[in-house]
């Protein structure tokens, strides 16, 4: 397994142990980067107006469409590291 993949998996584990809960904007960034790194580009229809959370998650993920897996993993790792301080 690659070093980046190991760092990514460690960051995912560390995300559950942060000293304080990140803001909703940061949580959406983490969600989008995680999904991009693990599933690739967003697919399917955008959730309807009544699903505000699903819509926000979809939009955050769609905003980084085209980002490579390694880049998404590195950005996720970097974001988690910045939150641990």
Image (tube, rainbow, N blue to C red):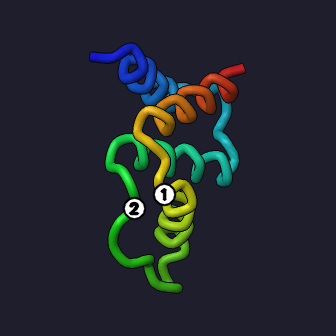
Q: Quadrant of the N terminus?
A: top left
The answer to whether 11 is drawn above or below residue 68 in the figure is above
The disc placed on residue 9 is: none
Identity of the residue drawn at 47% across and 53% down: 66
Where 23 sits versus 62, above or below?
A: above
Q: Closest to the observer: 24 or 71?
A: 71
Mark 2 secondary-structure assignment? loop
Q: Secondary structure at mark 1?
A: loop
**Disc 1 marks which residue?**
65
Q: Where's residue 35, x and y in %? A: 41, 48
Q: Mark 2 or mark 1: which comes first in sequence?
A: 2
Return the x and y of residue 47 as percentages of the image width and height: 43, 78
Query: Which residue was labeled with disc 2?
Result: 42
Seen at 62% across and 23% down, the residue is 81
Q: Quadrant of the C terminus?
A: top right
Label 1: few (<14), some or many (≥20) within 10 Å? some
Image coordinates for residue 70, horizontal then vertical, percent: 43, 32
How many marks overall? 2
Q: CA distance from mark 2 to mark 1?
A: 7 Å
């Amino acid at each position: 397994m690659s070093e980046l993949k190991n760092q990514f998996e460690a960051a995912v584990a560390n995300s559950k142990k942060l000293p304080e809960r990140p803001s909703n904007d940061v949580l959406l960034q983490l969600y989008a980067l995680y999904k991009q790194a693990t599933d690739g580009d967003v697919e399917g229809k955008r959730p309807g107006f009544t699903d505000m959370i699903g819509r926000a998650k979809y939009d955050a993920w769609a905003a980084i469409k085209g980002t490579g897996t390694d880049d998404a993993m590195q950005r996720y790792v970097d974001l988690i590291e910045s939150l641990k301080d």
